[in-house]
Image: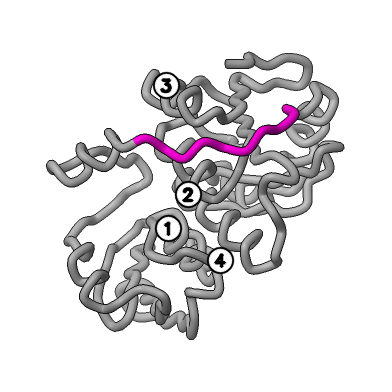
């Protein structure tokens, strides 16, 4: 359904999303878009259902209304996202922050998390059409799972949920059931993550961005194999 995101009373984006865990979505979106520096900056979240979809409102602190106004742009993002405009071209040319030094997860941990993720995807089990994003600790135990029809939305929901719970994302790894796009790589890095596992191959841009940031990237993850980039 359409989910309109409003920050400080200003319309920022309309996303096509699964209307579940929308408060997590608001938090994660604000963090990965750079509108909020910490989850504490995202306050007074209110979700309203209308005849046309949902409106998700939040107040941002630590960010002036004038600065937010400069960043507001009209855009409709669907589950297959793309690039548009000089602003986005300039944004992806900027280097990502380097992730902290870390030890990558073991093969056993990756296989365990992937196996458990399938059983925890309740929406996908009912519909066969939802992406999942999960956070696993270093042993491969899944601590949090979020789902959405949009692969990027699922990651935003996960990041928002982890931030709200005070869970440091660098203490484990993110696993996604989606194709590894550059946007997912950037969201994980900006959230402070160090390791990303996906079930499909990355785009060339995703692989390049991950390498430049020092993100450990594991793709084509299966029950008994994966490709480490």
Whole-Å distance between the Cαs marked 1 and 4? 12 Å
- State which tag comes first along the sequence, 2 or 4: 4
Query: Which-is-in-front pick, marks 1 and 4?
Result: 4
Q: Which residues are magenta?
A: 95-104
Within 10 Å of the Cα at label 1, are there few (<14), some (14-19), or many (20+) other Cα atoms?
many
Look at the image and tell me in which quarter the C terminus lies: top right
- On the image, the x and y values in percent for residue 225 come to 73, 14
Nearer the viewer's eye, disc 3 or disc 1? 3
Q: Quadrant of residue 17?
A: bottom left
Relative height, residue 50 to residue 202 (above, below): below
* Disc on the earlier residue, 3 or 2: 2
For marks 2 and 1, give the CA distance: 6 Å
The spot of residue 187 in percent (x, y) is 47, 45
Q: Between marks 3 and 1, how big is the CA–CA gap?
A: 28 Å
Which residue lies under the disc numbered 3?
208
Q: Tell me, for residue 41, which label it has, or none.
A: none
| Tag of residue 17 | 1
**Res 184 visible:** no
Q: Are marks 2 and 1 in contact (CB under 8 Å)?
A: yes
Q: Is residue 219 above or below residue 152?
A: above
Count residues near mark 4 (Cα–Cα under 10 Å), then give few for <14, some for 14-19, many for 20+.
many
Of circles 3 and 2, the one toward us is: 3
Kindly identify which residue carries mark 4. Answer: 24
């Amino acid at each position: 359904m359409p989910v309109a995101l409003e920050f400080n009373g200003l319309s920022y984006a309309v996303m096509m999303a699964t209307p579940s865990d929308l408060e997590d979505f608001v938090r994660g979106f604000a963090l990965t878009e750079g509108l909020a520096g910490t989850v504490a900056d995202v306050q007074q979240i209110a979700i309203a259902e209308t005849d046309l979809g949902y409106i998700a409102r939040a107040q941002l602190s630590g960010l002036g209304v004038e600065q937010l106004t400069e960043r507001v742009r009209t855009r409709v993002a669907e589950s297959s996202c793309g690039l548009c405009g000089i602003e986005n071209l300039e944004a992806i040319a900027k280097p990502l922050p380097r992730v902290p030094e870390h030890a990558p997860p073991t093969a056993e941990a990756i296989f365990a998390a992937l196996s458990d993720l399938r059983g925890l995807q309740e929406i996908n089990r009912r519909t066969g059409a939802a992406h999942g994003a999960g956070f696993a600790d270093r042993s491969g135990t899944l601590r949090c799972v979020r789902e959405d029809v949009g692969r990027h939305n699922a990651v935003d929901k996960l990041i928002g949920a982890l931030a709200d719970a005070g869970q440091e994302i660098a203490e484990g790894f993110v696993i996604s059931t989606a194709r590894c796009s550059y946007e997912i790589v950037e969201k994980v890095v900006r959230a402070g993550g160090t390791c990303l596992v996906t079930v499909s191959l990355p785009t060339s841009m995703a692989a390049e961005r991950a390498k430049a940031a020092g993100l450990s990237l594991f793709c084509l993850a299966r029950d008994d194999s994966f490709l480490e980039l």
